Amino acid sequence: MRITYRKNDSLAYWTQRWADVEADEPMENRASYPLKYALEAVARSSAPRGGRICEAGCGNGRLVRYFMRSGCNIRGFDFIPEAISKIKSVEPDAEVETGDILNLSYPDEYFDTFLAFGLYHSLPYELQDQAMQETFRVLKPGGVLCASFRADNLCTRISDYLRQPARKEEKKKFHKLNLTRREWEHVLLRNGFTVEKMDCVVNMPILYKFKCFRHATHKNFDEHKGRCEGYLLNLPGKLLWKVLYIIFGGGRCVMFLLFRLEKSRVK
Ligand SMILES: C[S@@+](CC[C@H](N)C(=O)[O-])C[C@H]1O[C@@H](n2cnc3c(N)ncnc32)[C@H](O)[C@@H]1O
């Protein structure tokens, strides 16, 4: 287990993060994280169109807006009220609300599909069981949870080293929890989930930070666009990325994605 410390704790970080950007456009690139995996989770649900879908930690709404437009029954929550207001300002009919994964207001066994990208690792290890039990409670038996978690690996260690606060006293605030694949799996199993598959995924490839590797339509760094279209690389970027993958393997991935977690019928 490794903890990433930053200048701001998770709540302060996300408050600032979502205050700084516009509401997301509905995501467009179905081949890109996280939409690609959300679609697969929905397709694997036994309920038509994923049944009642929840996006936990919906942020500024790129997935909620995508699934609304696709005619799915989706509901989202996030613990940052401003993120929710931003979604509402562009999508008044969106069923989104402020909420905390640690204490959900939904009834037991309410959702067929539960999406949670990059949320659980915002909580310290001591709160993981509470978050998982709340998730378990609101998910129907046989329901599907699709979630991504920050990996404790070479890639995140390098990234954290490069981004560590300049002054030592700033290192105090908990920012993210990093666990190995086996450790995340253990957290889920002991809370009643069956882990079907775990994949390595990357949100923004590090090469995207360099203009020379970005796709021609993404030459100006625009996170808003990247969040909607995916962080697109040009051909040299894609080739180099493949080489890095061969060299580092799973070591380069930033998150593990538990692609299909099925809530067991017996806990
Ligand atoms: C990595 S972002 C993902 C946002 C969105 N799912 C997306 O893919 O664009 C993680 C989100 O989880 C939210 N979050 C973190 N801790 C939370 C908590 N305890 N309860 C609810 N939301 C939380 C953050 O505010 C943030 O919006």
Image (spheres, rainbow, N blue to C red):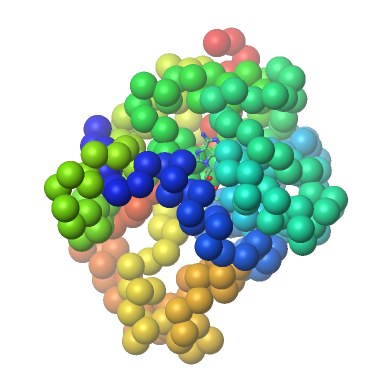
Q: 129 or 21: nearer the eye?
A: 21
Q: 133 or 188: nearer the eye?
A: 133
Q: Position of residue 45 (x, y in %)?
A: 69, 38
Q: Position of residue 43 (x, y in %)?
A: 69, 46
13 lies left or right of 105: left
Q: Position of residue 170 (x, y in %)?
A: 22, 47
**236 is higher (above) or lower (below) than 203:** below
Q: 44 or 227: nearer the eye?
A: 227
Q: Quadrant of the C terminus?
A: top right
214 lies left or right of 136: left
For the question of whether residue 153 can be seen, the reply is: no
Q: Residue at x 42, y 81 (%)?
A: 214
> In the orientation shown, which residue stands out farthest toward the left?
168
**1 is higher (above) or lower (below) than 255:** above
Q: Residue at x 44, y 45 (%)?
A: 12
For the question of whether residue 105 can be seen, the reply is: yes
203 lies left or right of 206: right
Q: 201 or 228: nearer the eye?
A: 228
Q: Residue at x 48, y 30 (%)?
A: 195
Quadrant assignment, res 207: bottom left
Q: Quadrant of the N terminus?
A: top left
Q: Position of residue 2 (x, y in %)?
A: 24, 37
Q: Residue at x 46, y 41 (%)?
A: 11
**Number of numbered discs overlaid on the protein picture:** 0
**238 is higher (above) or lower (below) than 254:** below
> In the orientation shown, which residue stands out farthest toward the top?
266
**215 is higher (above) or lower (below) than 225:** below
